[in-house]
Image (cartoon, rainbow, N blue to C red):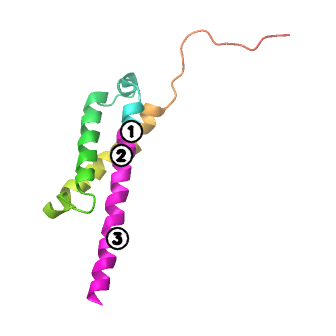
Amino acid sequence: MAENLQAAQMAVVTVLVVGCFAVELWAVISGALAPARAYVAAGRMPKPAWMALLIAATAVGFASLPPGYLLLRWGWIPPMIAVTVALVYLLMVRPQVKRPRRRRGPKSRPPSW
């Protein structure tokens, strides 16, 4: 009975850790694809600062993956900080960086027949 419970707990932990790593990987790819000028236009930290944070968060998430659960031996604090950084980027920064900007200049009009 206790072995089944422990196996179930490890399965839940594995799903959570892999899910957090997927979120961190999504954030780092999204951050890399956004243009640097969009960060400045949105009034956020520059792209190199966000990329450094996101790469570090992804590295922590990768080190927390099974089978070793390397960082989980130190507790849940490093992986939780890593997924928090990724979520802050995805929920607060990415919408502003991905927002389409209006172009200034002459507007194209449809031809008049």
Q: Earlier in the sequence, mark 1 or mark 3?
A: 3
Task: Classify mark 2: residues with Cα within 10 Å, few (<14), some (14-19) or many (20+).
Answer: many
Picture quarter containing residue 93?
top left
Where 33 falls versus 85 (above or below)? above
Q: Earlier in the sequence, mark 2 or mark 3?
A: 3
Task: Classify mark 1: residues with Cα within 10 Å, few (<14), some (14-19) or many (20+).
Answer: few
The image's mark for residue 29 is 1
Picture quarter containing residue 16?
bottom left
Mark 1–mark 2 CB contact (< 8 Å): yes
In this orientation, does residue 112 appear?
yes
Circle 2 residue: 25
The image's mark for residue 57 is none
* Residue 86 on image: x %, y %: 33, 46
* Residue 98 on image: x %, y %: 46, 33
What's the magenta region?
Answer: 1-28
Where 65 falls versus 34 (above or below)? below
Q: Residue at x 64, y 13 (%)?
A: 107
| Type of amino acid under label 3 | Val
Tell me if residue 23 is in the magenta stretch.
yes
| Type of amino acid under label 1 | Ile
Task: Classify mark 3: residues with Cα within 10 Å, few (<14), some (14-19) or many (20+).
Answer: few
Whole-Å distance between the Cαs marked 1 and 2?
Answer: 6 Å
